[in-house]
């Protein structure tokens, strides 16, 4: 494991700065944990992995998620803040044997769907350095795509895992509301912690570790983790095309239609089955941002986020409650739709990655118009409803940039989404990685070390 972690840390040093993926690196601690993993494998062989399924895996953590050993700056210029304890997701990763190699970049408080922060240069797409990695979990997506870690966790409040997963050509999963505890909880109840990885199998493995209730998050679900596989059966799938979808994105995602039908699924083309809830989303987000930002902290704020905060301060209580009523109506509408369909399928985002440093496509780039998230109409509705939604690579556009396919399930049916995505991925095939296959290398080394340990034990007997 030491060799693996050393190679990952070297890759972060060599290519991480150019990508702007990391804001902090846990070098010495990560190496100490790798040494401990090697000792454990030498002593226990395969048994070392029974209670530690991620033993030796390198994981990156988004800078919005608390870590006790690394600062959690939330993409902000506010003075460094170090949490007293790990967030539940990080604690569970460590308990499963994962090695946290660093904190990944985010926009300030995750406000925009592009990873632009005043803490450093914008996060760039590993597949085209002049393009955005998306956001606000762009650092995590870029790190996974570039082979700077085996897997990562991000947060998703309006598409912040799925957008960068689509842009960078990796798998990103926003689970059902409460599936993974979010501590401290988000006042808007939009954001979820979720995994990013190079394959659906790795995402499912992370979900098995991260899932479970925590009393500090009142939304966290009660009960054991969901199964990560289901028996194959034909599904009823609604295929939806959102406005402003580019011709290239349409072409790539529609190539997945024969895959779905070839798996025996019934696919119906349907119009967008709900009104656009963007205005309500803006009011919910802005109210929460305003409530969490003291006026004396305005001097520290990103200009775009400050426009959102100031708008939130202008909202009346009645306006916020109307937004919440829209959220409830959307949940009811989607619940009705999901009585007829097992899954919804669509392009994750309607466009290819835009320029690095921009916060949105040109038509929606002015935060003063409060359209900073409107360009991604297929992601934010499912934050308002709390439904599980996953983006997996569908292929590449003619310019070589990745395009994501999104699958959305019923609340609580995360396992169905993962199982369906796994079978679709097997037909489409995962994206060709940009960086080294760090996960595959870890598994090979772990297998060699386990076999060596077993042979040693056999010799002693």
Image (spheres, rainbow, N blue to C red):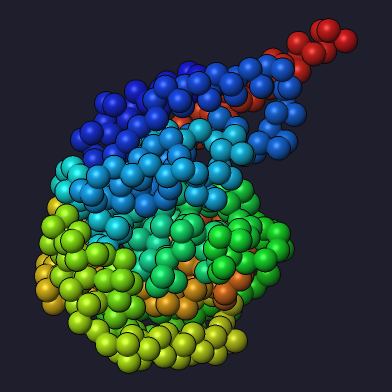
Looking at the picture, how far across and down is residue 143, in whole percent?
Answer: 35, 41
Q: Residue at x 70, y 63 (%)?
A: 223
Dividing the picture into quarters, in which one does residue 251 lie?
Answer: bottom left
The residue at the far right in this view is 461
Residue 370 x/y as whole percent: 18, 76
- The quadrant the C terminus occupies is top right
Residue 93 versus residue 255 in the image, above or below:
above
* Left or right of residue 260, residue 109 in this image: left
Q: Nearer the viewer, residue 22 or 436?
A: 22
Residue 423 in view in this figure: no
The answer to whether 133 is drawn above or below residue 20 in the figure is below
Q: Quadrant of the N terminus?
A: top right
At 45% from the left and 25% from the top, the residue drawn is 29
Q: Compare residues 279 and 353 and report the one nearer the observer.
A: 279
Horizontal and vertical percent position of residue 402:
32, 54
Rendered image quadrant of residue 414: bottom right
Taking 17 as reference, is 238 left or right?
right
- Residue 28 visible from this viewpoint: yes
Place of residue 81 in the rendered image (x, y in percent of width and height, measured from the top left): 33, 44
> From the viewer's perspective, is residue 84 above or below residue 231?
above
Task: Tell me the residue at 30%/39% (across/down).
Answer: 22
Viewer-proximal residue, 304 or 201?
304
């Amino acid at each position: 494991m030491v060799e693996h972690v050393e190679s990952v840390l070297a890759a972060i040093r060599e290519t991480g700065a150019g990508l702007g993926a990391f804001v902090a690196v846990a070098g010495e601690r990560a190496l100490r944990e790798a040494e401990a993993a090697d000792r454990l494998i030498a002593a226990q062989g395969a048994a070392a992995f029974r209670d530690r399924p991620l033993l030796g895996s390198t994981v990156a953590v988004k800078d919005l998620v608390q870590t006790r050993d690394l600062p959690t700056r939330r993409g902000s210029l506010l003075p460094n803040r170090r949490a007293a304890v790990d967030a539940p997701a990080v604690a569970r990763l460590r308990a499963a044997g994962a090695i946290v190699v660093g904190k990944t970049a985010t926009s300030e408080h995750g406000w925009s769907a592009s990873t632009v922060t005043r803490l450093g240069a914008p996060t760039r797409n590993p597949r085209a350095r002049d393009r955005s990695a998306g956001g606000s979990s762009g650092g995590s997506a870029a790190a996974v795509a570039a082979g700077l870690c085996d897997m990562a966790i991000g947060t998703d409040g309006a598409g912040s895992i799925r957008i960068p997963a689509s842009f960078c050509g990796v798998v990103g999963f926003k689970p059902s509301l409460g599936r993974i505890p979010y501590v401290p909880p988000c006042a808007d109840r939009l954001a979820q912690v979720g995994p990013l990885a190079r394959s659906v199998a790795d995402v499912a493995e992370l979900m098995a570790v991260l899932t479970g209730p925590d009393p500090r998050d009142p939304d966290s679900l009660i009960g054991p983790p969901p199964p990560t596989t289901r028996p194959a059966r034909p599904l009823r799938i609604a295929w939806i095309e959102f406005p402003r979808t580019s011709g290239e994105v349409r072409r790539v995602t529609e190539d997945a239609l024969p895959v779905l039908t070839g798996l025996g699924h019934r696919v119906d083309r349907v119009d967008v089955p709900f009104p656009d809830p963007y205005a309500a989303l803006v009011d919910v987000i802005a109210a929460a941002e305003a409530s969490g930002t003291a006026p004396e902290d305005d001097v520290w704020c990103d200009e775009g986020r400050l426009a959102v905060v100031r708008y939130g301060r202008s909202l009346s209580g009645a306006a916020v409650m109307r937004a919440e009523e829209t959220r409830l109506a959307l949940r009811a509408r989607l619940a009705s739709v999901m009585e007829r369909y097992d899954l919804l399928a669509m392009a994750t985002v309607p466009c290819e990655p835009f320029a690095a440093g921009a916060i949105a496509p040109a038509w929606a780039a002015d935060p003063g118009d409060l359209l900073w998230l409107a360009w991604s109409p297929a992601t934010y509705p499912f934050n308002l409803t709390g439904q599980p939604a996953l983006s997996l690579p569908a292929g590449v556009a003619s310019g070589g940039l990745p395009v994501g396919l999104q699958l959305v399930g019923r609340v609580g049916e995360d396992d169905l989404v993962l199982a369906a995505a796994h079978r679709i991925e097997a037909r489409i095939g995962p994206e060709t990685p940009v960086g080294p296959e760090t996960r595959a290398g870890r598994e090979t080394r772990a297998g060699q070390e386990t076999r060596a340990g077993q042979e040693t034990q056999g010799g002693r007997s």
